[in-house]
Image: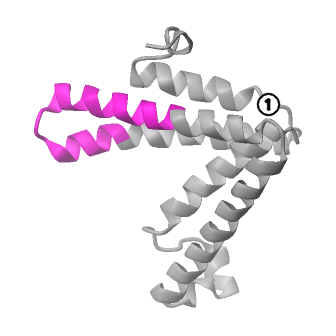
Amino acid sequence: MPDRDKNRPTTSEEWSDHISEFAHQWEFGSPGHCAVSDFANLQVLYGQLANEPKGALLSMNGAVNLTPENRLSLALQRIVLLEHTIEQNSSRIPGYASTYTELSYSFEKMILAASEEARTKFQDEEQKITAHVKSFYDEALDYVMSSVYDKQNPHS
């Protein structure tokens, strides 16, 4: 094991805490903050692929009237645009790529740890395993989104 991995988290709870602390450390507007914000927004966009639109604003502005195909197309276009922006920022903003990579790596490791823990606890109960892993993912993503929001809206 490389030296840099010696002090890394091992459990899903430790990874979740690491993600929260990592996301919170960046100053608003810094390359790290931008990378964290882009990562979180991309995760939210991917999550929207499976969800129906909800909310009073959507019914008023007409977005709820889009066909499922149009909603999917719009979501995919947003994902492509954000992924392109992430690629551009990674190549031209110092510190952006390493922050984005660390956050992505940390989420991956947290999900793998949560999955292993759930398989030990629930054995072959796939629904419980999936729910356990999703709860860690959702909680960590909420931490990240809250950190981004708090920095973008310091007086709220």
- Quadrant (top left/top right/bottom left/bottom right) for the N terminus: top left
Q: Is 25 situated above or below 9?
A: below
What secondary structure predominates along the stretch shown in magenta?
A: helix
User: Residue 148 placed where, x, y %?
Assistant: 74, 42
Label 1 is placed on what type of residue?
Trp
Q: Residue furthest left?
A: 124
User: Residue 149 placed where, x, y %?
Assistant: 75, 44
Q: Which residues are magenta?
A: 106-133
* Residue count near mark 1 (Cα–Cα under 10 Å), binned few <14, some 14–19, many ≥20: some
Q: For residue 36, which quarter of the picture? A: top right
Q: Is residue 83 left or right of residue 132?
A: right
Residue 123 is one of the magenta-drawn residues: yes
Colour theme: one colour
Residue 63 is one of the magenta-drawn residues: no
Residue drawn 56% across the image and 40% down it: 104
Q: Is residue 125 left or right of residue 106?
A: left
Which residue is identified by label 1? 26
- Quadrant (top left/top right/bottom left/bottom right) for the C terminus: top right
Q: For mark 1, give the secondary structure.
A: loop
User: Residue 62 placed where, x, y %?
Assistant: 64, 88
Q: Is residue 51 left or right of residue 36?
A: left
